[in-house]
Amino acid sequence: CFLIVSAFPPTHQQTATMATALSVSSFAGASLRAAVGSKANKQTTKAAIEFYGPDRAKWLGPLSEGSTPDYLTGEFPGDYGWDTAGLSADPETFASYREIELIHARWAMLGALGCVTPELLAQNGTPFGEAVWFKAGSQIFQSGGLDYLGNSSLVHAQSIIATLACQVVLMGGAEAYRVNGGPLGEGADAATYPGGSFDPLGLADDPDTFAELKVKELKNGRLAMFSMFGFYVQAIVTGKGPIENLNDHLSDPSAVNAFNYATKFTP
């Protein structure tokens, strides 16, 4: 258990309150918070039970009895007891897959936001040479180059070689630093989650809240990975960006939908 205790000595009333709070525990770890009511304590405890441990929600709901492998105990975030291919049977492989999934999830969330934002801005009057995500990069080969968010004063890219070199150095260096320990300290989650000497937002201060944030991040990241896959398929099938596809569908749902494209698809 991790405790967050005030630097000031508690009164007798505070001591009694702290002792009562210490009796509340959860699978994700118990924590003592100053100035937090019983409602918040119930919410974090409920979240811990819902997402972790043997009583967590599982992939088949009430029909999951007997379908969850023994090695999926609910210890880690995002574990809904589904592993029909046995990918998580080996602990070292499981740890590697968890890290890979999390990194891909974070990139997918950034990518999905980057795919829709330029189109949304362009529809609302922001000048772009090309707002569609899979066409925007080609502007770097044009005489005027590529301007980030259509503004040359932010980032102006003229050379694909220079851009590639910057990405390799900056992104490769940051990733190598992360994999080799970085500023996060030591521990099972040191290479993937904030904590230790690097936690400027205090996300890991409270274990219960942190455990819930891990689940929320992974769920949103999994959704973003599916979204990116959808963007890829849309680009191949329609040759349009996600926002334009959405507007076309909303304007005529019966004629512009996946079923009609599937029956008339000619790449």
Image (spheres, rainbow, N blue to C red):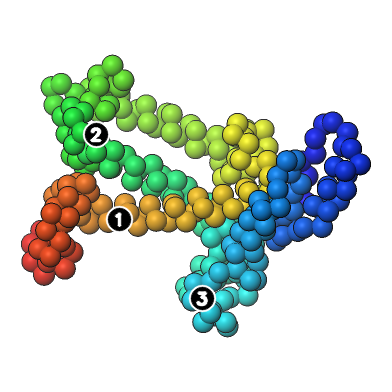
Residue 178: quadrant of the picture: top right
255 and 262: which one is in front? 255
Is there a contact, CB below 8 Å, between mark 3 and mark 2?
Answer: no
Question: Hey, which residue is sitting farthest right in the picture?
Answer: 12
Q: Earlier in the sequence, mark 2 or mark 1?
A: 2
* Marks 3/2: CA–CA distance: 41 Å
Residue receiving disc 1 = 229
Mark 3 or 1, which is nearer the eye? 3
Report the side of 245 relative to 197 (left or right).
left
Amino acid type, residue under disc 1 in the picture: Phe
Q: Nearer the viewer, residue 57 or 16?
A: 16
Q: Which residue is mark 2?
A: 121
Residue at image coords 51%, 57%: 97
Please rate how many residues cluster around mark 1, counting C-alpha atoms within 10 Å: few if below 14, some from 14 to 19, many from 20. Answer: some
Horizontal and vertical percent position of residue 135: 18, 39
Q: Residue at x 59, y 62 (%)?
A: 51
Question: Which mark is drawn over residue 61?
Answer: 3
Q: Compute the Cα span from label 3 to label 1.
A: 26 Å
Residue 150, x across and y down, in percent: 22, 25
Instruction: Classify 113 as above or below 21.
Output: above
In the rendered image, residue 85, in percent from the top left (x then y), is placed at: 47, 73
Q: Which quadrant of the figure has residue 168?
A: top left
Secondary structure beneath dot 1 equals helix
- Work out whether residue 236 can be spotted: no
Q: Is residue 35 above or below residue 245?
A: above
The x and y percentages for residue 25 are 75, 58
* Residue 50 seen from this side: yes
The amino acid beneath tag 3 is Gly
The quarter in which the C terminus is drawn is bottom left
